[in-house]
Image (cartoon, rainbow, N blue to C red):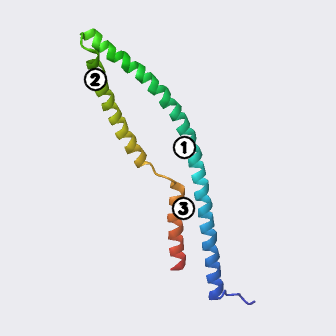
Amino acid sequence: MATYEPSIADVIKNAIRDAQDLVLSEVALAKAEVREEVRRVSVGAGLLAGAALASAVAVIFLMTTVALAIAVLLGWPLWSGFGIVTVFVALAAGALGYIGRKRITAARHMPRTVDALKENIEWMRARTS
């Protein structure tokens, strides 16, 4: 019984076909992950925008109340109460902005695609060696 040994051209054609299939699969995975991430982020962003608007209005009323209370209870001019409240709100905003920025930059984006690409690169190296 004769065994068929593939020629070098067949081996190269198969490797090229496998590489094309691999690239197409990776592109499809990346597209799916991006769609999923965009959908998740857009819903979350909408909810956060609504919460931010409601919180901003509440904070404005609360800070106005606190500023007026400081001025009236201590017998100081109104501007001093508003100045004190403004300083505290500015410090809180700075702290929240710093923490938020750190969390956003620490996020790992498209983890499955990155991991799959690394695995595929290793597989291609092993196959071509």
Of the image marks 2 and 3, the number of the one nearer the N terminus: 2
Quarter of the picture holding the N terminus: bottom right
First in sequence: mark 1 vs mark 3: 1
**Front residue of 18 and 129:** 18
Quote the CA–CA distance across marks 1 and 3: 23 Å
Question: In whole angstroms, how far apart are the C-alphas of marks 2 and 3?
Answer: 55 Å
Q: Residue 108 in the image: x percent, y percent? A: 46, 51
Type of the residue with mark 1: Val
Quarter of the image for residue 5 reads bottom right
- The answer to whether the residues at label 2 and label 3 have Cβ atoms under 8 Å apart is no
Q: Tell me: residue 6, above or below residue 54.
A: below
Residue 70 location, x and y as percent? 29, 14
Compare marks 2 and 1 and give the one earlier in the sequence: 1
| Residue contact at pointers 1 and 3, CB within 8 angstroms | no
Mark number for residue 116? 3
Query: Residue tagged by mark 2?
Result: 83
Looking at the rendered image, the disc whose residue lies closer to the viewer, 2 or 3, is 2
* Dot in front, 1 or 3: 1
Which residue is the site of mark 1? 41
Q: Residue at x 54, y 34 (%)?
A: 47
- Separation of residues labelled 2 and 1 (CA atoms): 37 Å
Q: Residue at x 62, y 77 (%)?
A: 16
